[in-house]
Image (cartoon, rainbow, N blue to C red):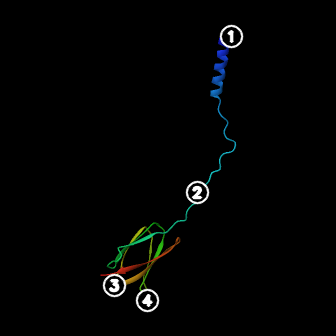
Amino acid sequence: MFKRLLSIIFLFVVFFFSCKKDPLIYSAPVIEEPTSPFVLKNDVYPNPCRGIFTIKTNTTDSQTVSLYNMTGLQILNLTINGTTAIVDNNLTNGIYLLRISSKYGTNTGRIVVSK
């Protein structure tokens, strides 16, 4: 009788631990993080410069670079298709406004030329 009871307990334990648990019927909701918009960043260096400066950007898309003097006259207009463009222009001493436009927006800044 004792052997039979042990065998029944043994079978019960084996059966209990060998059973797979049922998967959850309702899974927890997945909360997605909102995607942040792309922020266009441009670095212009050195500033002040001697007429030669570098524009470094975080996108490889086409961008339009415009350079204006303080009277509003456009001195330079070019398109860059990459992350870095070196602009060499025979600029005179002064402060210039730099405008970089792309499909992500427009950044403006100033650059000082001091020779």
Kind of residue at badge 1 = Met
Q: Residue at x 70, y 42 (%)?
A: 25
Instruction: Compare marks 3 and 2 and give the one earlier in the sequence.
Output: 2
The relative height of residue 68 versus residue 31 in the rendered view (above or below) is below
Mark 4 vs mark 1, CA separation in Å:
109 Å
Tell me the residue that label 2 is attached to. 33
Kind of residue at badge 3 = Asn
Q: Nearer the viewer, residue 18 or 2?
A: 2
- Quadrant of the rendering where the C terminus is positioned: bottom left
Instruction: Compare marks 4 and 2 and give the one earlier in the sequence.
Output: 2
Classify residue 8 by image quadrant.
top right
The relative height of residue 26 versus residue 34 in the rendered view (above or below) is above
Residues marked 4 and 3 touching at CB (< 8 Å): no
Kind of residue at badge 2 = Glu
Q: Which mark is residue 71?
A: 4
Tell me the residue that label 3 is attached to. 93
Mark 3 vs mark 2, CA separation in Å:
49 Å
Classify residue 5 by image quadrant.
top right
- Coordinates of residue 112 in the picture (x, y in percent): 36, 80
Q: Secondary structure at mark 4?
A: loop
Mark 1 vs mark 2, CA separation in Å:
63 Å
Q: Secondary structure at mark 1?
A: loop
Tell me the residue that label 1 is attached to. 1
Q: Residue at x 62, y 53 (%)?
A: 31
Residues marked 3 and 2 touching at CB (< 8 Å): no
- Coordinates of residue 105 in the picture (x, y in percent): 52, 73
